[in-house]
Image (tube, rainbow, N blue to C red):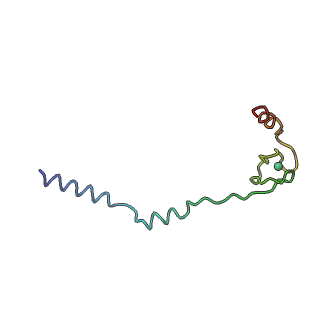
Amino acid sequence: MLGFFKSICYIIAMVNHMRHTRAHTANRRSHHALKTPNLSVCSNCQAPHLRHRVCPNCGNYKGVNKIDMTPKVTKKTVKK
Ligand SMILES: [Zn+2]
């Protein structure tokens, strides 16, 4: 009975060996690094922002004010 149990454990151990090598894992993970986003400079306030996005500092997009940022400023000032 003990021999049978040992053989079962041996088979399970063999199955556990069916894995990728460290090199295979490293090769796969070589593409996982994050890239820095390409930032543009706002034409209104010169703050960096993501391309094709509204400026988070002033709310302008292509020189047009899309988001009115004054309510945020007033909230902050009320908290202070
Ligand atoms: Zn801006």
Residue furthest bottom in the image: 23
Determine the residue positioned at 80% across, 37% down: 73
Foreground residue among 57 and 29:
57
In the rendered structure, the answer to whether residue 8 lies left or right of residue 31 reads: left
In the rendered structure, the answer to whether residue 75 lies left or right of residue 22 reads: right
> Which quadrant holds residue 34?
bottom right
Q: Quadrant of the C terminus?
A: top right
Determine the residue positioned at 86% across, 54% down: 43
Determine the residue positioned at 45% across, 63% down: 25
Q: Measuring from the top left, give residue 30's x and y in whole percent.
A: 53, 64
Foreground residue among 49 and 23:
49
Q: Measuring from the top left, give residue 78's x and y in whole percent.
A: 78, 31
In the rendered structure, the answer to whether residue 31 lies left or right of residue 3 reads: right
Foreground residue among 4 and 71:
71
Q: Does 45 sit above or below residue 38? A: above
Q: Measuring from the top left, give residue 36's x and y in whole percent.
A: 67, 59
